[in-house]
Amino acid sequence: MSDEEHHFESKADAGASKTFPQQAGTIRKNGYIVIKNRPCKVVEVSTSKTGKHGHAKCHFVGIDIFTGKKLEDIVPSSHNCDVPHVNRTDYQLIDISEDGFVSLLTETGGTKDDLRLPTDENLLSQIKDGFAEGKDLVVSVMSSMGEEQICALKDIGPK
């Protein structure tokens, strides 16, 4: 019927969703939840009793895993909430460029050059000082909902 080839430009990932639904009443402290379209770690959960006409409500207090901002949300406990897929990956630090980007060694031997240095002053100074001293550093990168950020640092000894 058709002899021409079709080429599709795909800018999306392989259909993997950034979040998955979970019933609000089953989300616990130290879990993750999406509040105002931001991935958050739950620091406090309180459940109110059912009212005269209604559902029990869950009050979530979460801290944005990338910015550290405190966010709150109230959801009926029987409703579904979005829970972000959160991944943590360790990479070895190879280089820090002048424009604030880091060069990281992946497990496959390639390099990852699209990450900025963290904004947290304490972590930033630890990375810069350790790198200047020539230590072998491994950084933990947290990724969720299309964002990535360095969140922790490990020293694996001198080179």
Image (cartoon, rainbow, N blue to C red):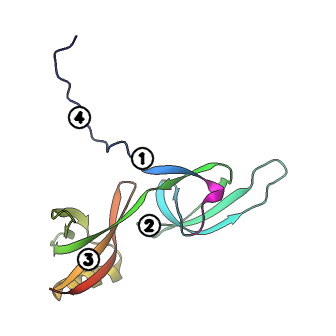
Picture quadrant where residue 150 is located: bottom left
Q: Amino acid at mark 3?
A: Val
Count of number-bearing discs: 4
In this rendering, position of residue 100 left or right of residue 54:
left
Q: Residue at x 20, y 29 (%)?
A: 7
Disc 1 element: loop
Q: Does the magenta run of residues contain 21?
A: no
The furthest residue to the right = 52
Binning the other alpha carbons within 10 Å of mark 2 as few (below 14), some (14 to 19) or many (20 upward) gives many
Q: Amino acid at mark 2?
A: Ile
Choose mark 3 or mark 2, whichever is in front.
3
Dot 2 corresponds to which residue?
65
Dot 3 corresponds to which residue?
138
Choose mark 4 or mark 3, whichever is in front.
3
In this rendering, position of residue 46 left or right of residue 122:
right
Between the residue at mark 2 and the residue at mark 4, the CA separation in whole angstroms equals 32 Å
Dot 1 corresponds to which residue?
17
Binning the other alpha carbons within 10 Å of mark 3 as few (below 14), some (14 to 19) or many (20 upward) gives many
Image coordinates of residue 54 in percent, x first then y, are 78, 49
Disc 3 element: strand
Q: Amino acid at mark 1?
A: Ser
Q: Does the magenta run of residues contain 28?
A: yes
Q: Amino acid at mark 4?
A: Glu
In the image, 120 versus 60, the foreground residue is 60
Q: Earlier in the sequence, mark 4 or mark 3?
A: 4
